[in-house]
Amino acid sequence: MTKRQFEDFVIESNIPINDEDRHTTKGKWLRLAKEMDLGDSFIANTHQEICCFRSICKKLGFKVRSRIIRDDNGNSTQTFRVWKIAK
């Protein structure tokens, strides 16, 4: 392994690609999008999850709608409901 510094980055050479981590996050969203029918929804915990799912759905030709989940008193929670819809 060879290391060199460039500004704030450490550049490393001869690092093998780990194929075990290949299908972690992106693959998860792709599998979820393909498993869902139009109008199906799931609960997301972060905006990042919504963005990842939306990106995959856009590539597959679908749209996504999301709404914050509110509790019984009408207060917003920290979770979101996300729907797969037609384009």
Image: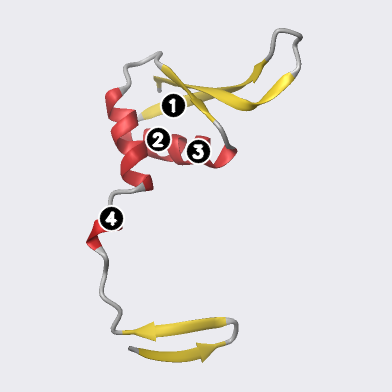
Circle on res. 49: 3
12 left or right of 18?
right
- Contact between labelled residues 2 and 1, with CB atoms less than 8 Å apart: yes
70 left or right of 26?
right
> Circle 2 sits in a helix, a strand or a loop, which is it?
helix
Mark whose residue sits in front, 3 or 1 = 3
Residue at numbered disc 2: 58
Mark 1 to mark 2: distance in Å?
Answer: 6 Å
Please identify the quarter of the rendering in which residue 74 is found.
top right
Residue at numbered disc 1: 63
Of residue 55 and residue 16, the one placed in the foreground of this image is 16
Categorize mark 4 by other alpha carbons within 10 Å: few (<14), some (14-19), many (20+).
few
Please identify the quarter of the rendering in which residue 59 is found.
top left
Circle on res. 22: 4
Type of the residue with mark 1? Lys
Mark 2 to mark 4: distance in Å?
Answer: 21 Å
Circle on res. 86: none
Mark 3 to mark 2: distance in Å?
Answer: 14 Å
Mark 1 to mark 4: distance in Å?
Answer: 26 Å
Mark whose residue sits in front, 2 or 4 = 4
Q: How many marks?
A: 4
The residue at the far top in this view is 72
| First of labels 3, 4 by sequence position | 4
| First of labels 2, 4 by sequence position | 4
Mark 3 to mark 4: distance in Å?
Answer: 18 Å
- The quadrant in which the C terminus is found is top left
Type of the residue with mark 2? Lys
